[in-house]
Amino acid sequence: MANTKSAAKRSRQSLARANQNRSVRTRLRTLQKRVRGAAKPDAEQIRGLISALDKAAKRGIIHRNAAADRRKARLNALLAGKK
């Protein structure tokens, strides 16, 4: 248990942030599964996922290189191969 009021507040804040970040990461995984599992993912789905990845990276939920270098590159390759 926290010894001071400020430590207790920090604990509450970190729990709230962890829950919010967990929901964002879960949503990203769900979107990725939908795109990868679809027989023919449309460009709008892929663009929506790329946008969600950018937002998560901007807020520090996922590392910016994980978003840009790996996940988005694979999605862009999938989009390019579809055309």
Image: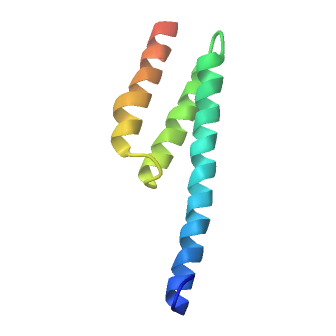
Which residue sits furthest bottom?
4
Residue visible at 63% across and 50% down in the picture: 23
Above or below — where is 17 with respect to 41?
below
**70 left or right of 9 in image:** left
Judge whether 11 appears above or below 16 on screen: below
Residue 44 found in image quarter: top right
- Which quadrant holds the N terminus? bottom right
**Viewer-proximal residue among 15 and 67:** 15
Give the x, y percent position of residue 2: 54, 84
Numbered label tally: 0
Q: Nearer the viewer, residue 10 or 43?
A: 10
Q: Is residue 67 left or right of residue 16?
A: left
The colour scheme used here is rainbow
Q: Tell me which residue sits at (49%, 16%) in the image.
A: 79
Taking the spot 56% from the left edge, 73% from the top edge, the residue there is: 13
Q: Residue furthest front?
A: 1
User: Which residue lies at the image location 46% right of the left edge and 8% below the top edge?
Assistant: 81
Q: Is residue 34 visible?
A: yes
Query: Residue 78: x, y in percent?
Result: 48, 15
User: 71 above or below 8?
Assistant: above
How far from the left and from the top, in percent, is residue 24? 59, 48
Quadrant assignment, res 76: top left
Q: Position of residue 47 (x, y in %)?
A: 54, 30
Q: For residue 44, say whether it is visible.
A: no
